[in-house]
Image (cartoon, helix red, strand yellow):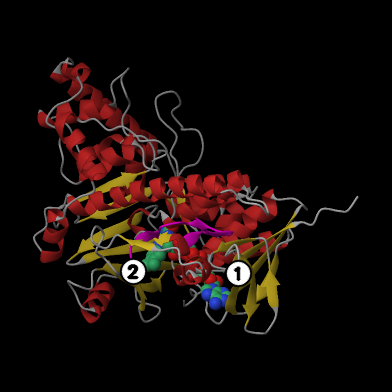
Amino acid sequence: MNPVEPLSIVIVGGGTAGWMTAAAFGHFLDEGFSVRLVESEAIGTIGVGEATIPQIRMFNQALGIDEDAFIRATQATFKLGIEFVDWLTPGSHYMHAFGDVGRDVGLCGFRHYWSRAARLGLAGPVGDYCLNDIAAKLGRMHRGAPKTPHNVPEMPHAFHFDAGLYAAFLREFAEARGVVRHEGMVAEVRRDGLSGDVTGLRMASGETISGDLFIDCSGMRALLIGDALGSGYEDWTHWLPCDRALAVQSERVADFTPYTRATAHTAGWQWRIPLQHRTGNGRVYCSAFTSDDDAAESLLAHLDSPALMVPRPIRFTTGRRKEAWRNNVIAIGLSSGFLEPLESTSIHLIQSAISRVLKFMPGKVQAQADRDEYNRQFTFEMERIRDFIMLHYTLNERDEPFWRACRDMQLPDSLAAKIELFRANGHIFREGDDLFGEVAWFQVMAGQGITPAGSHALADTIDPDDLKGYLETLNALYVREAQRYPDHAEFIARHCAATAVSEGVPA
Ligand SMILES: Cc1cc2nc3c(=O)[nH]c(=O)nc-3n(C[C@H](O)[C@H](O)[C@H](O)COP(=O)(O)OP(=O)(O)OC[C@H]3O[C@@H](n4cnc5c(N)ncnc54)[C@H](O)[C@@H]3O)c2cc1C
């Protein structure tokens, strides 16, 4: 019997998307597959992408990666949520914290009790009833079972990490599992004249790399899916008008907060991501409302620590690839689309695409029905995250032209319906595989100033004094719990301090 030729997979690109894909393929695929990755050091990677959401832990765990080893290798810190500063009005702030908010009572979600209490003037901000929020603001960190069992939920976490170090970490992991790396620049993408499938890559060195399945992780260049195959791009700039970013690293700050900070500014917003060895910062802005120079000046003026480099400009167009899988090419990462990093979703989208590809795992003969379903799931996921990011912009009450334009824009029907539903009686229903659940929507809608006009009828039956007592008890319980946790920096020093505190890696 002739041995079966392994299915040859070629990954183009060695950024976060390329090496996450390579690591997962190396781990999950057996000898029936050969996996190669092509990257060009001369081109380099986008060099940003440092804040994550808790799902990243599932990715690392599925690969058998030890959490503390990963933290040490990537200069990571813990992240319990994102603080939004000045988004509703200057001076306002709230957190989209991971984890639960309050406690549901029977059939009735906590948000109904909160909204009734808010109307009666008896409720604090939503964050008063969220363990992650309270611990984040106290600068505390804890993993695993709560110290006060039965009454307190677990505290989910994600990470801030150095994206370059994460890619290097995964490269070592992938190469140890048989992934072969090719250094060099792709000069031409070759296609079959009949099917249109990609057959191989001609490298600048003259070498040809052929394959059966190609994963396009070439970043915003979209070498295969866009340039070669012509899968179009659906532009969402009319909904998310920011189109530029400036990224800058600054010195480490001694007390690294266990949360990302996103601060609204005149025509965009600024991120702050504390790592063990440095701080990642950047300004996302809309070029129609501010100049590059003003954005750079304002970015530098709002750093917590001295800059380590000159701000690096990045241009982008928010939107998605019309088909992320076309012919025998699947786009993962920035080649498949871009949503600004307000909710740290891009790395999650990479992870989610990898798991989708593994579920479909196309062979040498591919079915259009598979592609259609893959693209449907991809589109659903992108559109729901787009809506969630838009939510922060559209509900603002700021007074600058950019923010007025965001407030006045025509919303996608899906988003408008969700806001109206919450405004009326506090209802939120998770749709299908929407990444963001009810608690996330609740925190942002309440944080952006909505108090529902009514509540679930069950919440209306509770006596106001009992309601007040219930909320106060919950808050006191969570504050007491969080106060039992160690300081974030102390927690890292004890469990997972990076061995070398470097000066930072200029991108
Ligand atoms: C301003 C900004 C901030 C962000 N912040 C976050 C965040 O906080 N959290 C988050 O989850 N995501 C964030 N992202 C998104 C995140 O950076 C990306 O999702 C992630 O880095 C993946 O990028 P990539 O691997 O797709 O592309 P890239 O990093 O651009 O990698 C592309 C690869 O393709 C290779 N390549 C390209 N052309 C060729 C060629 N001709 N020949 C050979 N190789 C080639 C390059 O060498 C490189 O290796 C942010 C993005 C931006 C723009």
Residue 233 against residue 137 in the figure, above or below: below
Q: Position of residue 129 (x, y in %)?
A: 28, 34
Taking the view exactly as shown, the residue that stands out farthest to the right is: 1
Bin the neighbour count of mark 2 within 10 Å (Cα to Cα): few under 14, some 14-19, many 20 and up.
many
For image coordinates 74% across by 60% down, the residue present is 178
Extreme residue toward the front, this view? 194
Q: Position of residue 268 (x, y in %)?
A: 23, 65
- Judged from the image, the secondary structure of the residue bearing numbered disc 2 is strand
Q: Indicate the position of residue 137 as horizontal and vertical percent values.
A: 32, 48
Numbered mark located on residue 409 in the image: none
Q: Which residues are magenta?
A: 316-333
Report whether 144 appears left or right of 85. right
Q: Is residue 148 above or below residue 45?
A: above
Which numbered disc flags the more N-terminal residue, 1 or 2?
A: 1
Residue 346 belongs to the span the image colors magenta: no
Residue that appears at 68% across and 51% down: 27
Label 2 sits on what residue type? Gly
Q: Position of residue 416 (x, y in %)?
A: 20, 43
In the rendered image, the vertical position of residue 331 relative to residue 125, given as above or below: below
Tell me which residue sits at (15%, 31%) in the image: 424
Indicate whether residue 319 is drawn in magenta: yes
- The residue labelled by disc 2 is 282
Q: Are marks 1 and 2 in contact (CB under 8 Å)?
A: no
Q: Does the Cβ of the disc 2 residue fall within 8 Å of ligand 1?
A: yes
Label 1 CA crowd tier, 10 Å (few <14, some 14–19, many 20+): few
Please name the residue shown 22% across and 16% down the image: 458
The answer to whether 11 appears left or right of 89 in the picture is right
- Amino acid carrying mark 1 in the image: Gly
Q: Secondary structure at mark 1?
A: loop
Q: Which residue is mark 1?
A: 193
